[in-house]
Amino acid sequence: MKDLSELANQLVAMLREKKFVEAQEQLFAADAIAQEPEKFKERSVTGKNNIILKEKRFLKGVKEWTRFDVSEPIVSQHHFSIRMYTEVDLINNQKVVLDEIIVYEVLDGLIVKEQFFY
């Protein structure tokens, strides 16, 4: 089983390579939760498969990545957080800019919850 720092660093490395789905497949628990801010409650999902489907839907709509940065993780006993800054142009010509903090909860070496703040 990986220690939390190792898991956090692995996730950051995968995100920086835009290996989002692979990271979810490898590092998330089967019953993981992805929690969006309250104003986007309908987009919060439970279950690794649903998290992956949500990610694939978003990625399918991306036409071009303008900017993408992921910070080093800040690690505590059962949690870690990162700052992720994303600018993308979607295929519908909409521009999306997200400057977010993501907090991950880890149990038994797997991510059981990701919570987005933006």
Image (tube, rainbow, N blue to C red):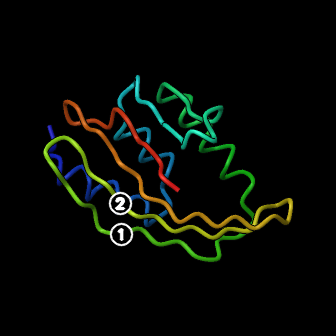
Q: Toward the viewer: 29 or 74?
A: 74
Q: Earlier in the sequence, mark 2 or mark 1?
A: 1
The percent position of residue 103, horizontal first and vertical second, equals 35, 48
Q: Which residue is at a point 70% across and 64% down the rendered structure image?
A: 96
Q: Do the residues under discs 2 and 1 have CB atoms within 8 angstroms?
A: yes
Q: Which residue is at a point 59% across and 44% down the rendered structure image?
A: 55
The percent position of residue 81, horizontal first and vertical second, equals 31, 55
How crowded is the residue under tag 2: few (<14 C-alpha within 10 Å), some, or many (20+)? Answer: many
The percent position of residue 89, horizontal first and vertical second, equals 74, 68
Residue type indicated by callout 2: Ile
Q: Which residue is at a point 26% across and 53% down the rendered structure image?
A: 8
Q: Toward the viewer: 23 or 117?
A: 117
Quadrant containing the N terminus is: top left
Q: Which residue is at a point 86% across and 59% down the rendered structure image?
A: 92
Q: Residue furthest bottom?
A: 66
Q: Circle 1 sits on which residue?
A: 71
Q: Toward the viewer: 104 or 39?
A: 39
Compared with residue 69, is residue 112 higher up or lower down, i.e. above or below? Answer: above
Residue type indicated by callout 1: Ser
Compared with residue 36, is residue 102 higher up or lower down, i.e. above or below? Answer: below
Mark drawn on residue 56: none
Which SS class for mark 2?
strand
Q: Circle 2 sits on which residue?
A: 82
